[in-house]
């Protein structure tokens, strides 16, 4: 990782941890991070999601930037941070997960990658599918293939 990438990532982390997550500050930091082209970017951005953030727009900026990667890289990044994300930011974990479920190609990629995922990732995914099914049974058709792949 370049020094500039590390600097901008740390700056972004400070903004979010301070509870602000002001969209304009986040957008500038994300643009700077994206310019660096680091392959860790999607996972780094997703790991910054916070249920304590004051502004949802800032969190959606992180999600949109992470989603701009190809599905393979994005799903790999999401799965790598998912067990932590479910614990640290369950609201945003649910939002990100449902966005994947609502994208046919991303959902198919998740099913593919889950087959070889570590047990902790599979456990977190099955738990999230269960939560979603309890609240929104209409998601069953989208969660069943993912749940099966995580079994």
Image (cartoon, helix red, strand yellow):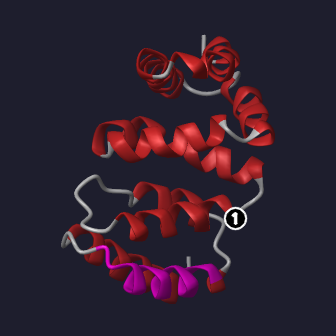
User: Quarter-wise, where is residue 112 in the image?
Assistant: top right
Give the percent coordinates (x, y) of residue 101: 65, 34
- Residue 37's place in the image compared with 89, above or below, is below
Task: Name the element at disc 1.
Answer: loop
Bounds of the magenta segment: 21-34
The secondary structure that most of the magenta stretch takes on is: helix
Q: Residue at x 72, y 34 (%)?
A: 107
- Residue 79's place in the image compared with 9, above or below, is above
Inspect this view and state whether residue 92 appears. Answer: yes
- Farthest left residue in view: 18
* Quadrant in which the N terminus appears: bottom right
Q: Residue at x 67, y 23 (%)?
A: 142
Residue 52 located left or right of residue 138 = left
Give the percent coordinates (x, y) of residue 36: 63, 83
Reply yes or no: does residue 33 show up in magenta.
yes
Reply yes or no: does residue 29 show up in magenta.
yes
* Residue denoted by label 1: 68
């Amino acid at each position: 990782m370049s020094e500039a990438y590390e600097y901008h990532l740390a700056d972004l982390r400070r903004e979010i941890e301070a509870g602000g997550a002001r969209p304009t500050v986040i957008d500038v930091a994300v643009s700077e991070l994206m310019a660096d082209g680091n392959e860790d970017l999607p996972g780094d951005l997703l790991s910054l999601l916070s249920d304590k953030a004051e502004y949802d727009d800032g969190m959606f900026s992180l999600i949109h930037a992470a989603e701009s990667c190809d599905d393979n890289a994005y799903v790999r990044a999401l799965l790598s941070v998912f067990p932590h994300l479910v614990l640290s930011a369950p609201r945003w974990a649910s939002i990100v997960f449902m966005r994947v479920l609502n994208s046919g190609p991303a959902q198919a990629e998740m099913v593919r990658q889950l087959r070889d995922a570590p047990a902790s990732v599979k456990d977190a995914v099955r738990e999230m599918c269960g939560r979603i099914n309890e609240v929104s049974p209409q998601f069953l058709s989208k969660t069943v293939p993912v749940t099966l792949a995580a079994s």
